[in-house]
């Protein structure tokens, strides 16, 4: 298990500027706030998989397994893509000890309770925090702590958040499991666009197919097939934003070989057809 921050350092800010994200699937005993300033890819938090992009703002509670991985083009030689992000690690108890007895105490405590499932915040909260993360990175001493507490206060009042991990999700993983799942998730995110036989992914986990299926379900509360479909549909949702791509191009690039199967999986996961999803995206993008 990655502790995220040492006991004597209960608040840490890290600025990321590199070609691609290379952290492994892991969990730690700190809360973590992540703002993606540049870059895109796939994010797994608990049992939830979703695309991330510029402006993605997420708060994760302690011991919530997660991984962020850029899409394959970031790993190509001589590409000009970059990923930039601000990451803040902190101990919830440290924050609560500073505000115990104040009006903010209960509100922030509720925020940390919600964060146990992971929270993704919307554009409104992102706009309210514009410039705040850069200020935190460059500030020193008490000013850095003050700006951080202001950020937590704003997040505690935000209404435009979405839960990530499901309501029933419980972390059943050990640090050894996290290492094995890192290999599995990295393989799935890299190769989801093609057929991945059960024998292949079980081999990545160094297990028999039967043992792997049982192991995967007990640790994630989902079947391997279901999780793979969620990775593919998350990618399809991103592609549907591009009006120049046909539905056929979208499903082929997302790992499906026929429209009927794609439509069925898409509707099972999103409760909409691909055409309905695209239409809704276009309506939301129209100026008011």
Image (spheres, helix red, strand yellow):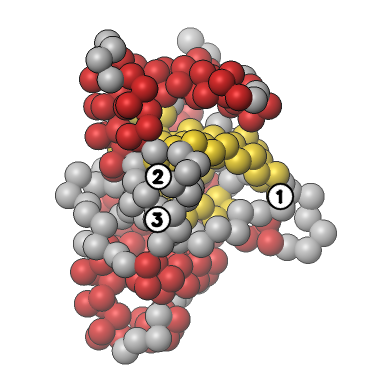
x, y percentage for residue 177?
35, 71
Q: Which residue in the structure is indicated by mark 3?
A: 27
What residue is rendered at 48% in x and 47% in y? Answer: 5
Q: Residues within 10 Å of mark 1 (few under 14, many from 20)?
A: few
What residue is rendered at 55% in x and 32% in y? Answer: 55
> Looking at the image, is 217 positioned above or below residue 22?
below
* For the residues bearing labels 1 and 3, Cβ distance under 8 angstroms: no
Horizontal arrangement in the rendering, residue 2 relative to residue 260 (left or right): right
Q: Residues within 10 Å of mark 3 (few under 14, many from 20)?
A: many
> Looking at the image, is 89 positioned above or below residue 173?
above
Q: Secondary structure at mark 3?
A: loop
Q: Residues within 10 Å of mark 2 (few under 14, many from 20)?
A: many
Asked whether residue 118 appears in the rendered view, the answer is no
Q: Earlier in the sequence, mark 2 or mark 1?
A: 1
> Looking at the image, is 157 positioned above or below residue 282?
above
Q: CA distance from mark 2 to mark 3?
A: 9 Å
x, y percentage for residue 68?
51, 52
Q: How many marks?
A: 3
Q: Which residue in the structure is indicated by mark 1?
A: 18
Horizontal arrangement in the rendering, residue 89 relative to residue 102 (left or right): right
């Amino acid at each position: 298990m990655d502790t995220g921050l040492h006991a004597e350092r209960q608040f840490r800010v890290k600025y990321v500027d590199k070609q691609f994200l290379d952290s492994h699937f892991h969990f730690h005993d700190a809360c973590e706030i992540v703002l993606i300033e540049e870059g895109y890819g796939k994010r797994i938090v608990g049992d939830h998989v979703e695309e991330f992009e510029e402006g993605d703002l997420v708060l994760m509670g302690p011991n919530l397994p997660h991984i962020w991985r850029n899409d394959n083009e970031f790993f190509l030689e001589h590409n000009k893509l970059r990923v930039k992000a601000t990451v803040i690690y902190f101990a919830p108890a440290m924050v609560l000890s500073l505000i115990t007895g104040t009006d903010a105490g209960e509100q922030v405590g509720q925020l940390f309770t919600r964060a146990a499932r992971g929270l993704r915040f919307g554009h409104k909260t992102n706009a309210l925090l514009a410039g705040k993360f850069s200020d935190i990175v460059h500030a020193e001493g008490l000013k850095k702590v003050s700006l951080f507490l202001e950020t937590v206060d704003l997040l505690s009042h935000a209404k435009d958040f979405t839960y990530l991990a499901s309501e029933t999700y419980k972390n059943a993983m050990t640090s050894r499991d996290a290492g094995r799942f890192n290999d599995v998730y990295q393989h799935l995110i890299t190769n989801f666009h093609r057929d991945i036989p059960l024998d292949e992914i079980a081999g990545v986990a160094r297990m028999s197919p039967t043992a792997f299926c049982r192991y995967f379900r007990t640790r994630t509360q989902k079947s391997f097939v279901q999780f793979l479909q969620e990775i593919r549909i998350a990618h399809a949702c991103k592609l549907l934003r591009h009006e120049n791509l046909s539905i056929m191009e979208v499903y082929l690039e997302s790992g499906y070989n026929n429209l009927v199967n794609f439509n069925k999986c898409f509707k099972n996961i999103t409760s909409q057809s691909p055409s309905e999803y695209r239409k809704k995206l276009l309506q939301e993008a129209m100026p008011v």
